[in-house]
Image: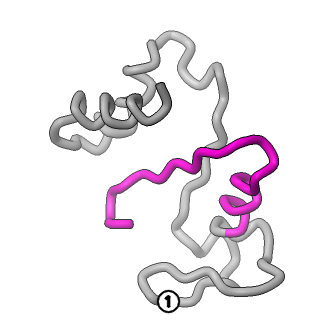
């Protein structure tokens, strides 16, 4: 991933999405392998020193916003260009 990008994991229930996210964030230690960011091994680094954000999905995240506005929220905060096109591309993946 490049700086400023968002990542979404899509998959059926039980496929390991939450486990993967919790491992990358440092809340779970991997049984095998390692976690690297920018080529640096952060496997043993505690969560508070990883500079990684983790937000779990909630149906009521921003109940006053529609789907498009919810997806665009973080992009607007970061002043990303072509927000509407990026939101459409992401929503096309899940529709």
Q: Quadrant of the N terminus?
A: bottom left
Q: Is residue 83 left or right of residue 13?
A: left
Residue visible at 79% across and 69% down in the picture: 28
Residue 37 in the image: above or below residue 56: below
| Mark 1 residue element | strand
Residue visible at 65% across and 65% down in the picture: 25
In the rendered image, which quarter is residue 72 located in? top left
* Percent coordinates x, y for residue 33 in the rendering: 70, 86
- Which residue extends farthest left? 81
- Magenta residues span 1-23
Q: Nearer the viewer, residue 11 or 2?
A: 11
Residue visible at 69% across and 62% down in the picture: 20
* Percent coordinates x, y for residue 3 in the rendering: 32, 65
Residue 66 in the image: above or below residue 91: above
Residue visible at 49% across and 31% down in the picture: 94
* Percent coordinates x, y for residue 35 in the rendering: 62, 80
In the rendered image, which quarter is residue 70 located in? top left
Q: Is residue 4 left or right of residue 65?
A: left
Q: Is residue 3 left or right of residue 38?
A: left
Q: Main secondary structure of the magenta part?
A: loop
Label 1 CA crowd tier, 10 Å (few <14, some 14–19, many 20+)? few
The residue singled out by tag 1 in the image is: 40
Residue 8 in the image: above or below residue 82: below
Q: Is residue 5 left or right of residue 30?
A: left
Q: Is residue 5 magenta?
A: yes
């Amino acid at each position: 991933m490049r700086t400023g990008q968002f990542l979404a994991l899509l998959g059926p229930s039980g496929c390991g999405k939450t486990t993967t996210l919790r491992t990358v964030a440092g809340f779970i230690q991997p049984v095998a392998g390692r976690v690297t960011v920018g080529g640096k091994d952060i496997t043993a680094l505690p969560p508070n020193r990883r500079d990684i954000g983790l937000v779990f999905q909630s149906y009521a995240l921003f109940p006053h916003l529609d789907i498009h506005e919810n997806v665009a929220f973080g992009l607007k905060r970061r002043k990303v260009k072509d927000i509407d096109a990026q939101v459409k591309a992401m929503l096309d993946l899940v529709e």
